[in-house]
Image (spheres, helix red, strand yellow):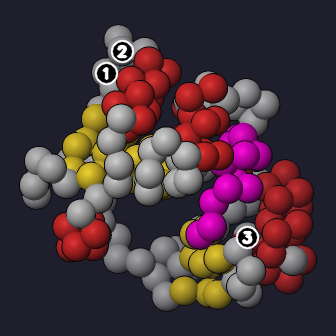
Amino acid sequence: MAYMLQRTRCKFILIDVEGVHKWSPLDPKVQIVLHPSRDMDRQALLMQTIRKVQNEKYYIVAVEGIDAFQTCFWMPPELKDFVQYGRNYKWGRSSYWVTCRRLADVHKDIVANADHHFIFRSFEPNDVHNYYRRYLGKEVALKIQNLPDYHFYYWRVGKAPQLCAPVKKVI
């Protein structure tokens, strides 16, 4: 990933709510990792980060656990603008990467504006039946419940979902 970021000259910001990632900075211009403390307001950190990238171009903002910053019914206005217009509006060529544990907890605008989806095993009936079935079809949705460890489906909008080989366990 670091090679890709250096090659594209994007600035990368990771907001890691749970403090899971302990990446050492490869290049201060390429990677910034933010771990909100328990005392820090998570919403304020996200809004501060989005305001920072509003004045810059070529940012990738990655949010580990997006469900900590919004609900399926509400999202901060700055985040909504970034998700809906970040690639084409005042931010130039910025984009976002998000992770979540449950798709049903993510605002529909985040899911609708994402071009690439990496879907790991999910057991939650609401996610499988209401979301994956709608986007991927019944057969794939049922297979998601039985995926082996570290296997995932990759789905790009407009393409058929593909079962992918296991990812290497990093943590």
Residue at (41%, 35%) from the top-left corner? 54
Residue at (60%, 46%) from the top-left corner? 85
Left or right of residue 134: residue 158: left
- Seen in the picture, residue 77 relative to 128 is either above or below; the reply is above
SS category of the residue bearing label 1: loop
- Closer to us: mark 1 or mark 3? 1
Q: Is residue 57 magenta?
A: no
Q: What residue span does the magenta drawing correspond to?
A: 104-116
Left or right of residue 66: residue 54: left
Q: In the rendered image, which residue does mark 2 sit on?
A: 40
Q: Is residue 114 magenta?
A: yes
Circles 2, 1 touching at the beta carbon (< 8 Å): yes
Amino acid bearing label 3: Gln
Circles 1, 3 touching at the beta carbon (< 8 Å): no
Calculate the distance from the C-alpha at mark 2 to the C-alpha at mark 1. 5 Å
Amino acid bearing label 2: Met
Q: In the rendered image, which residue does mark 3 sit on?
A: 145
Name the image quarter holding residue 51.
top left
Instruction: Say whether disc 2 or disc 3 marks the residue closer to the N-terminus.
Output: 2
Amino acid bearing label 1: Ser
- Closer to us: mark 2 or mark 3? 2
Toward the viewer: 157 or 54? Answer: 54
Left or right of residue 141: residue 47: left
SS category of the residue bearing label 2: loop
Q: In the rendered image, which residue does mark 1 sit on?
A: 37
Name the image quarter holding residue 75.
top right
Q: Position of residue 131 (x, y in %)?
A: 82, 59
Residue 99 seen anywhere in this rendered image of the structure: no
Residue at (44%, 56%) from the top-left corner? 93
- Seen in the picture, residue 130 relative to 53 is either above or below; the reply is below
Circles 2, 3 touching at the beta carbon (< 8 Å): no
Instruction: Say whether disc 1 or disc 3 marks the residue closer to the N-terminus.
Output: 1
